Amino acid sequence: MSQELITVTSPLLPSLDELTPLLKDIWNRHWLTNNGHYHQELEKALAEYLGVEYISLFTNGTLPLITALQAMRITGEVITTPYSFVATTHSIWWNGLTPVFVDVDPATGNLDPQKIEEAITPKTTAIMPVHVYGNPCDIEAIQEIADRYGLAVIYDAAHAFNVKVNGRTILDAGDMNTLSFHATKTYNTVEGGALICHDARTKKRIDYLKNFGFAGETTVVAPGINSKMDEIRSAYGLCNLKHIDEAIAARKKVAQKYRAALANIAGITLFAERDDVTYNYSYFPIFVNEKEYGMSRDALYAKMKEHNVLGRRYFYPLISDFAMYRGLPSATKTNLPVATRMANEVICLPMHAGLSDEDVERVLKIVITKE
């Protein structure tokens, strides 16, 4: 078998034949950014594809998180997960707010609703859950808690592009949802992101905030930031959107092969798939129990690298373990036993539309034989 490098992810790339006419048109229009033609077209196309009414494009996936907190004027404490990418908690810090970590559900890796309620204080104003790996959160339970205590809910849906439950998008849950269109994601605009809301007035505020707060040529209505998506990335995204269904179908085949081969391997556990969920197969995490598997997670990770297979310990370490957050009272490992175990056991196997059958077999051979 080939020993070429197998990466954990590979971007969905539009063809040059598709992209070149759009780039020429951008050149001829002399309109490179600031809510240009393709920016507007991509917002419309994504809203239709995702089944949402109001979406605002951003230059990356972190700025929508920061802007969502600004748009909702969140103060005080925000309950969130330690089991995510650092941008989730960094967005809270950048707004001068206090993150409060709670533990996760071992069946999904998402915030445990029972733990959320225990963490609410008089200073709590919002909950920021994450649909980890595209697994839907318990939206109903979280909303019930939020309604009871008068809290905002902002979902970090970076992994949840077009994920549905019973045929309905999960991107209309809560007050706002953010997406990441980074090159490592199922759908990408090279770098990019989006913020989804429920009404035109809120979208207008979001669009002010992502453009320095300008409401006109000489009027600034809020201390905004510059986070607009440019025309080139918008055009790139329009091309990729034509191929996203095909890419997700290819990812699903890879996931099915992994799942069938690893279902009965001692010491390897997988998240269960729900019949009512339409997944996008963003990631394929496995969890390694050293005692039962006979090899530690880190030893398996190193073994994979020896064979030019790049898995990813995603998410490790926990956000709560990083220097800027570990001093928080909620960051203790005794408060986060499930998240701590998952972080110490997880490896995400290579998962992207470009994986061949040979690639998948090579990955599986390493995990199953440990050789």
Image: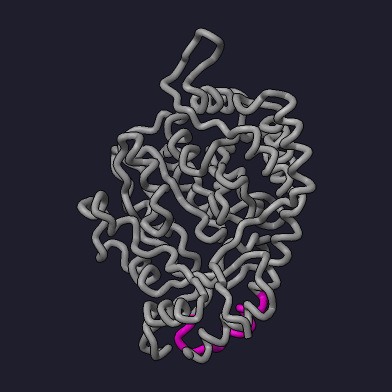
Image quarter hosting the N terminus = bottom right
Foreground residue among 107 and 84: 84
Query: Can see residue 169?
Result: yes
Coloring basis for residues:
one colour
User: For this view, does 350 lie left or right of residue 151?
Assistant: right
Instruction: Give how far across and how far down residue 362 sits, in percent.
Output: 59, 83
Q: Is residue 130 magenta?
A: no
User: Which sits in the foreground, 327 or 308?
Assistant: 308
Count of marks, rendered view: 0
User: Residue 22: x, y in percent?
Assistant: 75, 37
Q: Give the side of residue 221 with respect to residue 232, left or right.
A: left
Front residue of this view, candidates 323 and 144: 323
Quarter holding residue 185 = bottom right
Report the side of 288 relative to 75 (left or right).
Answer: right
Magenta part of the chain = 256-268
Q: Residue 328, image x and y in percent?
A: 23, 51
Image height check: is 212 above or below 369?
A: above
Q: Quadrant of residue 298?
A: bottom left
Q: Residue at x 63, y 35 (%)?
A: 55
